[in-house]
Image (tube, helix red, strand yellow):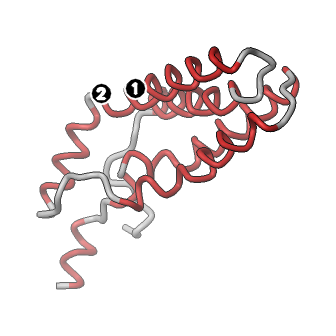
Amino acid sequence: MTNRTLIVAAPTPVRAATSILLGLAVAVMAMPIPNGFKVIGLVVCVAAGLMVTFSHPYRRRVRAAVEERNEKYTTTISQVLPLFPLWLALMVLPIVTGSWVLAVIVWVIAAAYAWFVHPQLDGTAHIRPLADDNRRA
């Protein structure tokens, strides 16, 4: 096993739904709709996306894998930092004149990025195999 092997992985539907919702949250900011609706859409999409990931039963396996290694089951900066580009897009996009074409392009790019960083977001990328722990001891 290598360090890149995931011990516990998010189910594909969970990863896809979360990525689509986080991408939509960013895309809402590029839509030609009133700012109040943009904020409501943003909050609903982010909340739903995170709820999909963090309320799914696979999180019990993640917690067990972390505790099996005598590590703390907490959110770390390395889990939150990959969200910075999405946050930056949320801050910059309201400055740009909104259009539906731009919103779709942003949605695709942001969803693809969210798909790529999902293992960091949910913490599964940071769980090392026990075999690696034994070799280092």
The residue at the point 64 percent across, 26 percent down is: 24
Task: Work out whether residue 42 or residue 60 is closer to the camera in this orientation and state it.
Answer: 42
Which sits in the foreground, 29 or 101?
29
Q: Which residue is mark 2?
A: 55
User: Quick one: label 1, few (<14), some, or many (20+) residues within 10 Å?
Assistant: some
Q: Position of residue 17 (x, y in %)?
A: 52, 26
**Element at label 2:** loop
Relative to 16, is 65 above or below?
below
Disc 2 + disc 1, Cβ < 8 Å: yes
Instruction: Give 72 or 13, whichever is nearer the viewer.
Output: 72
Residue 82 position, x and y percent, is: 53, 55
Residue at image x 41%, y 33%? 11
Left or right: 55 with respect to 44?
A: left
Q: Amino acid at mark 1?
A: Val
Task: Give the side of residue 33 with respect to residue 131, left or right.
Answer: right
Residue 137, image x and y in percent?
16, 85
| Residue located 54% across and 30% down the image | 16
Task: Name the residue: 73% across, 44% down.
Answer: 92
Query: To which quarter of the image does residue 87 belong?
Result: top right
Residue 52's tag is 1
Helix, strand or loop at mark 1: helix
